Image (spheres, rainbow, N blue to C red):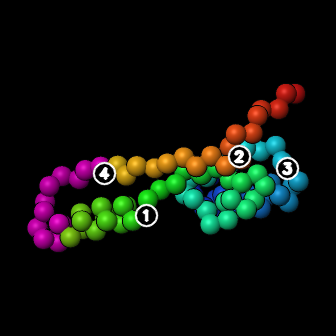
C-alpha cells in the first residue's frame, strides 16, 4: 500500500527496475498515469474539492470567532480497481 502518489511512483519505479511483476500495489490518491501502466494501478481516490471545501469552511469559521472543540470530518473515498492490487498470491 502506497500512502500517497509520490510513494506509488517510487514503488512503480523500484519494481520496474527490479523486473518484478508479482508485487500487488494499491495507492492512496489517484495518479494521472495510473491507467496507462501494466497492470494499471488500483487506487483509493480522494475528493480534493470536498477536502478543500471542508478545510476552508473550518478555517473561515475559526477566523470568524468559532472556538468549538476540534472535530473530525470524514470525506468519502472510492476504490478504483484496475488490476495491480488484485494480483493473486504466488505459491512457494
Mark 2–mark 3 distance (CA, rounded to whole Å): 15 Å
Q: Nearer the viewer, mark 4 or mark 1?
A: 1
Name the residue rendered at 88%, 53% in the picture: 19
Instruction: Estimate the x, y position of residue 45 in percent, counting from the top left.
Output: 52, 54
Q: Which residue is the site of mark 2?
A: 83
**Most extreme residue toward the left, as rendered?**
65
Q: Secondary structure at mark 4?
A: loop
Tell whether position 65 is magenta: yes
Q: Which residue is the site of mark 3?
A: 20
Sequence-wise, the earlier of marks 4 and 1 is 1
Label 2: few (<14), some or many (≥20) within 10 Å? some
Label 4: few (<14), some or many (≥20) within 10 Å? few
Image disc number at residue 35: none
Q: Secondary structure at mark 3?
A: loop
Sequence-wise, the earlier of marks 1 and 2 is 1
Sequence-wise, the earlier of marks 2 and 3 is 3
Q: Nearer the viewer, mark 2 or mark 4?
A: 2
Mark 3–mark 4 distance (CA, rounded to whole Å): 39 Å
User: In the rendered view, does 65 fall on the left or right side of 83?
Assistant: left
The residue range painted magenta reads 61-73
Q: Which residue is the site of mark 4?
A: 73
Name the residue rendered at 55%, 57% in the picture: 29
Q: Secondary structure at mark 1?
A: helix
Q: Nearer the viewer, mark 2 or mark 3?
A: 2
Q: Which residue is the site of mark 1?
A: 48
Sequence-wise, the earlier of marks 2 and 4 is 4
Amino acid at each position: 500500500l502506497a500512502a500517497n502518489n509520490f510513494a506509488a511512483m517510487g514503488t512503480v519505479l523500484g519494481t520496474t527496475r527490479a523486473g518484478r511483476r508479482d508485487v500487488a500495489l494499491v495507492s492512496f490518491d489517484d495518479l494521472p498515469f495510473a491507467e496507462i501502466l501494466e497492470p494499471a494501478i488500483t487506487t483509493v481516490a480522494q475528493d480534493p474539492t470536498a477536502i478543500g471545501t471542508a478545510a476552508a469552511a473550518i478555517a473561515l469559521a475559526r477566523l470568524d470567532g468559532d472556538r468549538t472543540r476540534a472535530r473530525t470530518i470524514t470525506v468519502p473515498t472510492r476504490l478504483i480497481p484496475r488490476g495491480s492490487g488484485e494480483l493473486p498470491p504466488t505459491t512457494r
